[in-house]
Amino acid sequence: MEPCSSGDGISWVAPPNPAVFVQEGPGEFLPGAVAQGPAGYLVGEGEAAGFSAEGTIWRSGDGVHWSTVATPALDDLKHPWTVLGLEDRYLAGAWSGGRQLWFESTDGTRWTPASMPDGLAYLEGDASRGLRAVDSDGAPWYSRDGHNWTKAILPSPLDGFYVSWARMPNGHLLAVGGFNIVGNPHQEAILVESADGVTWQTASFVGSSPATTAVAGDTVFVTAGGGPNGRTQLWATADSGQSWTLVGENSSGGIDIQLASNQRVIVSTDTGWLQGEPLQPAP
């Protein structure tokens, strides 16, 4: 499999020689979620493959040339790594002994244990949105900077953490609120928003059963599964949730947002790749 590059997510070309993702040193580089921070780009090996025998972290200054970095503080933890990038540092986490351990670094090489409430796991986010996590009881937490953490307050009847979330142009966070699957197996998800990431309220949304959110420029997109006759729908708002427009729907399967960048969104369905408003086949 050969990587390709694109400036707009529509037109893709094979890379020149030497190829994109030139790796230096031993190991197989399978990039997953790339974290951007103060020392360039980091990625934990195994995020794409689903495993990593050595818990390797890769670093790049340009996003093209990658090399492994020595991480003495992490060498005893042979687990898949999750790497997150913030404005002033990186966070790296791995499971060990049934707990998720978190470390922080400003350069991607020197790592020390991160200070955060005990039991937090499943951290996700970035410098734009902040970070969210859940504790051992499944309760949601939020941090704008990764240093200061506050337990989030979700509107009733939500009792689970938001699954998919994005920062809207007005600065508010928009998220899909979920439920404890054991306690509420038949409840539908709810779209929620927050000005501070801590206190959440039900968002104004004309669709039902929201699933994922994404932002492309000034437009926010939400996929929802509650359309007529079970159709999956894609909704858009250009005013941070004040009004919504139905962009498209799929009567025979799901709609998955694959790319949201600038003013463009690209989705995949069982019938192919689509883009635009309304949705049209992508070239």
Image: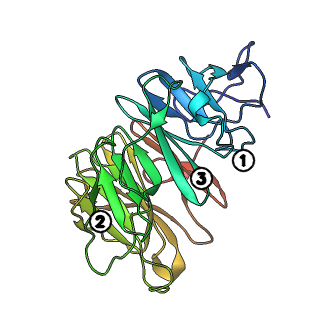
The x, y position of residue 179, in whole percent, is 42, 76
Image quadrant where one finds the C terminus: top right
Label 3: how many Cα within 10 Å (few below 14, some 14–19, many 20+): some
Residue nearest the viewer, comparing 184 with 213: 184
98 vs 170: above or below? below
User: What's the distance in space between the residues labelled 3 and 2, CA to CA?
Assistant: 30 Å
- Circle number at residue 66: none
Q: Earlier in the sequence, mark 1 or mark 3?
A: 1
Q: Residue at x 44, y 54 (%)?
A: 278
Q: Residue at x 52, y 48 (%)?
A: 101
31 vs 176: above or below? above
**Quadrant of residue 210 within the rendered picture:** bottom left
Residue nearest the viewer, comparing 77 with 180: 77
Q: Nearer the viewer, mark 3 or mark 2?
A: 3
Q: Residue at x 33, y 45 (%)?
A: 130
Q: Nearer the viewer, mark 2 or mark 1?
A: 1
Residue placed under numbered mark 3 in the picture: 95
Residue placed under numbered mark 1 in the picture: 51
Q: Earlier in the sequence, mark 3 or mark 2?
A: 3
Which amino acid lies under the numbered mark 3 shown in the image of this protein?
A: Trp
Which amino acid lies under the numbered mark 2 shown in the image of this protein?
A: Val
Residue placed under numbered mark 2 in the picture: 192
Which amino acid lies under the numbered mark 1 shown in the image of this protein?
A: Phe
Label 3: state its secondary structure: strand
Q: Nearer the viewer, mark 1 or mark 3?
A: 3
Label 1: state its secondary structure: loop
Image quadrant where one finds the N terminus: top right
Residue furthest to the top = 17
97 vs 178: above or below? above
